[in-house]
Image (cartoon, rainbow, N blue to C red):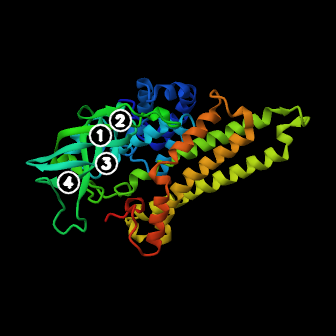
Amino acid sequence: MSAVDAAGAPQHAAEILRRARALAPVLRERAAEIEANRTLPADVVELLRGTGVFRMCFAREWGGPELTSLEQLAVVEALAYGDASAAWCAVIGANSGLLGNFLDQSVVKEVYPSLDLITAGVLAPAGRAERVPGGFRLSGRWSFGSGIKHSDWVTSGAFIFQDGEPWAAPGSEHAHDSRQFLVPRSAVGVVENWDTTGLCGTGSCDYTMTDVFVPEEHTFTFYEVRGTPSPLAQPDSFMRALCGVPLGVARAALDHARGIASDRFDRMAGRAWSESWRVQTELARCEAEFNAAREGVYGALRRQWEVLAAGGTLDDLTPTERAASPLAWLHAFRASRAVVNRLYDLLQTWSINRTSPMDRWLRDTAVMCQNLTAQDAVLESVGAYLLGRPPLFRISLGLDR
């Protein structure tokens, strides 16, 4: 069976990964331009589209390659090895296929006639949706809309109101319900406020909507699967591959530092860096930390996928197994930042120039660790869950209510 379809679109995980790895050196060469542009250049978006990353989550029933979560993670790592901002936008844009599991199925082909369309947006309910006949009127301002400028569709979380009052479905355990609202990119206004230390090229601007009509069928929640049940039709599915970005960056930094250490000669000490105990032990220590963090992610995902692919649910995992994934994601972010910081110090003044990739990796990992998946809210939620208490950040554990 061919790795591509008649139009040349990749149909299998191996081909998508091959293309991602081939693109990584190009992204590394374009990294300074991507950063200066404060959003992905249009041709870089098309290069990413050509890898198949934006279609990788679509189910086979829709003609997609339906990569497993582990395969998605490997693709994101490969892209991040080239540039963190490009990989960050890629993994978020790839959510289109995951959202298709929760949308009304009559809508999927309507909104995604091509599987390579990009969805961006903010899932946190920051907006206000007033019930009207046939749907909702959506207004609000959302922060950190990564990839918003080059997206085709935007999904946004909002609280529901009816006749100006907070609304909740009969029998809901919440006093005020929220859901996701899918709108065309043309309905969204972008606020040019993305001016950050790192991940500069993601274009993660705020965006606004005012009184935008959203049909009922273009709304969804992650608690109601409308497509065919599968391991990807889970509330936490869109979070699983994001930590591939810090892992890919840390791997790039490790290889960069090893290359420098292999060639550099310390004139003051009168010996090669490769003969230095300090260099040898620090590189080995960073490799150990990276390997442990990466295997923690893959090990937790492997076990989760094993259960789900056999027809089980996340409830079939033990509490320890269920907690392993969000903890591993968080640890991957934090351990990758620590590895990059230590390598930055190891290379000393060879790290500090803007022309050094270490400078960008240091700033990128610092910023990506401010994402919710790397924050103490995850630790608090997982700890509460393990102690039998209600977790705050429930979706990180794949809890639907």
Of the 4 image quadrants, the one containing the C terminus is: bottom left
Instruction: Kindly report the distance in space between the C-alpha atoms of the residues bearing marks 4 and 3.
Output: 20 Å
Instruction: Kindly report the distance in space between the C-alpha atoms of the residues bearing marks 4 and 2.
Output: 23 Å
Of the 4 image quadrants, the one containing the N terminus is: top left
Instruction: Kindly report the distance in space between the C-alpha atoms of the residues bearing marks 3 and 2.
Output: 16 Å
Q: Secondary structure at mark 1?
A: strand
Label 4 vs 3, first from the N-terminus: 3
Tell me the kind of residue under disc 2. Answer: Ile
Q: Find residue 147 and report its horizontal and vertical position in percent.
A: 39, 36
Q: Secondary structure at mark 2?
A: helix
Task: Answer with left or right where residue 89 lies relative to residue 291.
Answer: left
Tell me if residue 349 comes above or below residue 387 in the rendering. Answer: above
Q: Please report the residue visible at 49 percent of the width from the left and 51 percent of the height from the top.
A: 70
Disc 4 designates what residue? 160
Instruction: Kindly report the distance in space between the C-alpha atoms of the residues bearing marks 4 and 1.
Output: 18 Å
Tell me the kind of residue under disc 4. Answer: Ile
Q: Nearer the viewer, residue 338 or 284?
A: 338
Label 2 vs 1, first from the N-terminus: 2
Disc 3 designates what residue? 99
Label 1 vs 3, first from the N-terminus: 3
- The reply to whether callout 4 and callout 2 are in contact (CB within 8 Å) is no
Q: Quadrant of residue 187?
A: top left
Q: Find residue 132 and report its horizontal and vertical position in percent.
A: 10, 48
Label 4 vs 1, first from the N-terminus: 1
Q: Find residue 124 and report its horizontal and vertical position in percent.
A: 33, 51
Instruction: Kindly report the distance in space between the C-alpha atoms of the residues bearing marks 2 and 1.
Output: 7 Å
Q: Can residue 59 be seen from the camera position used here? A: no
Q: Nearer the viewer, mark 3 or mark 2?
A: 2
Tell me the kind of residue under disc 1. Answer: Val
Disc 2 designates what residue? 148
